[in-house]
Image: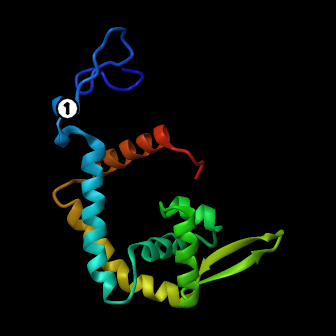
Amino acid sequence: MENGFSGEILGDAERPNTRLPSLGEIGLNNFAPYIMNRLIARWNANLAEELKTRDMTTAKMRALAVLSVSPSLTINELSVFAVMEQSTMSRTVDSLEEQGLISRKPRAGDMRVRDVAITEEGRALFDVFWPTMYEGLRQMFQDIDDDEYRAFLTTLHKILRNIRKHDL
């Protein structure tokens, strides 16, 4: 099983004359991208309810979350880490800057590059939402022990390496 599946779950497409299973044969509940989409859609919907109370969006919160653990990033880097299109991130950064939640400054070594950083106001707002995010995480992994959680993260990181388009 050095290259992935043993063939029990999704078949072995590397063997000649192997028929690919249909989505119906795999089933939605065994199709990992479907399950991951459901999880993230529910996560975002739960978070969006809380964000509305402060005129925030999921995109803005993702940007603040990433910037809360990074000293500064370019818009391109921020868009990769926050998992959104660069054009959407540009608009999000504009709005966050207007709200005083982030700042943009030219990079010392290259004035063409603008570094984006969270402001104290942005950090304070993120700190208001962090307990909600953390409680959502705890709810999501209720009844899952530490070893299962670590194994899950290890698997997710392997998947990310397999599909990654950026080095970030």
**Which quadrant of the structure image shows residue 62?**
bottom left
Q: How is the image coloured?
A: rainbow
Q: Label 1 amino acid?
A: Ile
- Please name the residue shown 22% across and 33% down the image: 23
- Residue at the image position 26 percent from the left and 47 percent from the top: 34
Horizontal and vertical percent position of residue 74: 65, 67
Name the quadrant of the N terminus.
top left
* Residue at figure coordinates x 40%, y 83% from the top left: 56
Report the residue that reaches farthest toward the top. Answer: 16
Residue 103 in view, yes or no: yes
Q: Secondary structure at mark 1?
A: helix
Q: Nearer the viewer, residue 161 or 12?
A: 12
Q: Is residue 137 above or below residue 28?
A: below
- Horizontal and vertical percent for residue 7? 27, 20
Q: Which residue is mark 1?
A: 26
Can you give x and y, in whole percent of width and height, for residue 5 in the image? 32, 25
Identity of the residue drawn at 17% across and 29% down:
25
